[in-house]
Image (cartoon, rainbow, N blue to C red):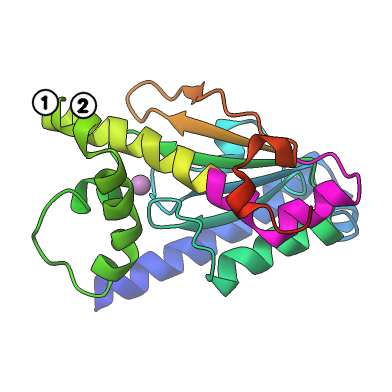
Amino acid sequence: MCARVSLIDECFAANRRWAETTVARDPTYFKRLAALQDPDLLWIGCSDSRLPPNEIIGRAPGELFVHRNVANVVEHTDVNCLSVLQFAVDVLKVKHVIVCGHYGCGGVRAAMTPRPLGLIDNWLRHIRDVALWNREELTAIHDPEARANRLAELNVEAQVANVCHTTIIQDAWRRGERVTVHGWIYSLADGLLRDLGMKIESPEQIPPEYRVTF
Ligand code: CO
């Protein structure tokens, strides 16, 4: 219990040092920032503690709107994720939505084993769906790590599609707003991002079955 209290104390001490250093370097920093939230990017990524989105892509506070959950899932009835997406697109007017997965994702790995973990297994069902849809390709990969990494990529592709199938993105396109949805993957091994080449910016790029406003 003592260790726990001291960890929390450390967080507050670090926070005070950070605020002081920041003001020393730039006296109007917090004043300016309080009035300025103008991000052009929405990041939908994994909750993994090794993956700080702003740092990875060099965005200052105010420049990146963020939603994170286990294994970067965009579920079409998840009011939390949809609310972030709607606020980002309709109110903040972001120009790009990025779904970013990562290699070595614990959520993806967990979805590949039958071992129960609890409530989270229901969430990871979405990844199991992706694995089922791509069963042939995945079973042909013998190395378990390579297979999990491929599933992480396929999961990003599926979640990019889910973003595009929402009424939020389709309504924005209908209004003539330029919103592009991207799928990226991050490697914990070298700190580099890879673009999975999914630049989706119009309803013609999604299956007619999922088009809702055209
Ligand atoms: Co992860």
Residue 28, x across and y down, in percent: 89, 50
Crowding near the residue tagged with mark 1, few <14, some 14–19, many ≥20 C-alpha atoms within 10 Å = few
Q: Are marks 1 and 2 in contact (CB under 8 Å)?
A: yes
> Magenta stretch: residue 26 in it?
no
Query: With respect to residue 188, does 190 lie above or below?
Result: above
Judged from the image, the secondary structure of the residue bearing numbered disc 1 is: loop
**Which residue matches tag 1?**
143
Residue 212, x across and y down, in percent: 71, 58
Q: Is residue 38 visible?
A: no
- The amino acid type, in three-letter code, at marker 1 is Asp
Q: Is the magenta stretch mostly helix, strand or loop?
A: helix
**Which residue matches tag 2?**
146
192 relative to 119 in the view: left or right: right
Instruction: Check the picture and name the quadrant holding the N terminus.
Output: bottom left
Residue at left offset 30%, top offset 30%: 150
In the current view of this chain or complex, which residue is farthest to the front? Answer: 208
User: Mark 1 and mark 2: span between their CA atoms?
Assistant: 5 Å
Residue at left offset 55%, top offset 45%: 161
Is the CB of mark 2 within 8 Å of ligand 1? no
- Figure quadrant of residue 102: top left
Residue at left offset 39%, top offset 49%: 49
Crowding near the residue tagged with mark 2, few <14, some 14–19, many ≥20 C-alpha atoms within 10 Å = some
Query: With respect to residue 116, does 184 lie above or below?
Result: above
Residue 108, x across and y down, in percent: 28, 47
186 relative to 118 in the view: left or right: right
186 relative to 54 in the view: left or right: left
- The amino acid type, in three-letter code, at marker 2 is Ala
In the current view of this chain or complex, which residue is farthest to the bottom? Answer: 1
> Magenta stretch: residue 170 in it?
yes
| Magenta extent | 161-179
Query: With respect to residue 92, does 197 lie above or below?
Result: above
